Amino acid sequence: MKLHVDREMCQGHSRCHTTYPELFDIDDEGTAFVIMEDIPPGWEDRAHNAIANCPERAIHIVKESP
């Protein structure tokens, strides 16, 4: 599983980084970005919670190519 933050949609609420600093970081402008390339199998719940708690719905699952 891979995550992506749409930087155009992110408004810098920082909920993802505050809740899951092991998955997200914030740049100098306050925009979130994913720091973990592949989400470990046991962390899917964290990823889904981050998606659900983003007020701008800026976090998405990236579909991997077959």
Image: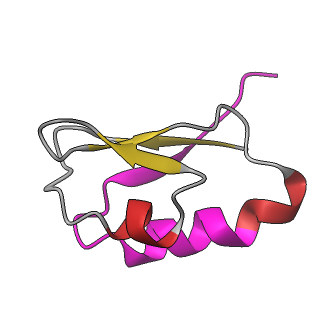
Tell whether position 55 is magenta: yes
Is 14 located above or below residue 22 in the figure? Answer: below
Q: Is residue 39 left or right of residue 18?
A: right
Side (left or right) of 37 relative to 29: right
Residue drawn at (56%, 75%) of the image: 49
Q: Nearer the viewer, residue 12 or 9?
A: 12
x 40%, y 69%: residue: 18
Q: Position of residue 61 (x, y in %)?
A: 56, 48
Front one among 32 and 66: 32
Quadrant of the image containing the N terminus:
top right
**Position of 19 relative to 63 (above/below):** below
Name the image quarter holding the C terminus: top right
Q: Is residue 51 left or right of residue 48?
A: left
Left or right: residue 11 versus residue 51 is left
Q: Quadrant of residue 41?
A: bottom right
Coordinates of residue 42 in the picture (x, y in percent): 87, 63
Furthest residue in direction top, as rendered: 66
Q: Residue 40, percent across and down? A: 82, 49
**In terms of image quadrants, where is residue 46?**
bottom right
Q: Please name the residue shown 13% across and 56% down the image.
A: 11
**Residue depicted at 49% across the width and 68% down the height:** 50
| Residue closest to the far right | 41
* 66 is higher (above) or lower (below) than 50: above
Q: Would you place residue 6 above or below residue 49 in this image?
A: above
Q: Is residue 29 magenta?
A: no
| Color style of the picture | secondary structure
Q: How many callouts does the rendering have?
A: 0
The range drawn in magenta is 45-66
